[in-house]
Image (cartoon, grey):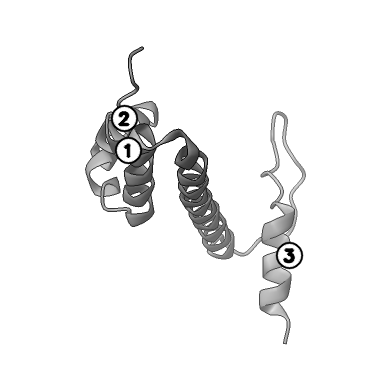
Amino acid sequence: MSRYVFPGYPAFLDAAAAELGRPELAAPARRVTALTSMANLCAQATHAEAGHVAGIMAKAAEFRDQIATALRAADLMLADVEAGRAPEPGPPAAPGPGASSPPPLSGRVRQFRAARDRP
């Protein structure tokens, strides 16, 4: 029976950057500490005794969730700044043919702004 060998995280970073159409981002992403830690745990899990694999993978999943949380926070920060830097709206104009309105802010961004703007 062949044993799985973890190829290392540069291969996954290259694939992810290619999927995003931004191959130049693979190199700087190698400095993300949580991703390095997750990759080390994945590599350990490929060589660990069967009884230890679940615990190792659970810890790796924690790092994945931290990275996902950081990504979501980054998206929320960018959305908030972009919305806050938008020009002040003038008087509403009648929509022309084919005009569309901008998408509404997500509930979380509205909640964040409401909490931030409270005295």
Query: Are the residues flagged by discs 1 and 3 in contact, CB closer than 8 Å?
Result: no
Give me the disc on residue 6: 2
Q: Secondary structure at mark 2?
A: loop
Instruction: Tell me which corner region of the image, top left, top right, bottom left or bottom right, holds residue 48.
Output: top left
Q: Residue at x 59, y 59 (%)?
A: 83
User: At label 2, which amino acid type do we have?
Assistant: Phe
Q: Which residue is depicted at the point 62% across and 64% down? A: 88
| Rendered residue at 26%/53% (across/down) | 31
For disc 2, the neighbor class at 10 Å (few under 14, some 14 to 19, many from 20) is: some
- Disc 2 or 3, which lies upstream in sequence? 2
Closest to the observer, 106 or 68: 68
Q: Which residue is mark 3?
A: 111
Horizontal arrangement in the rendering, residue 36 relative to residue 94 (left or right): left
Classify mark 3: helix, strand or loop: helix
Residue 9 higher or lower than 15, as above or below:
below
Q: Residues within 10 Å of mark 1 (few under 14, many from 20)?
A: some
> In this figure, which residue is indicated by the disc labeled 1?
43
The residue sitting at the top extreme is: 1
Q: Nearer the viewer, residue 100 or 12?
A: 12
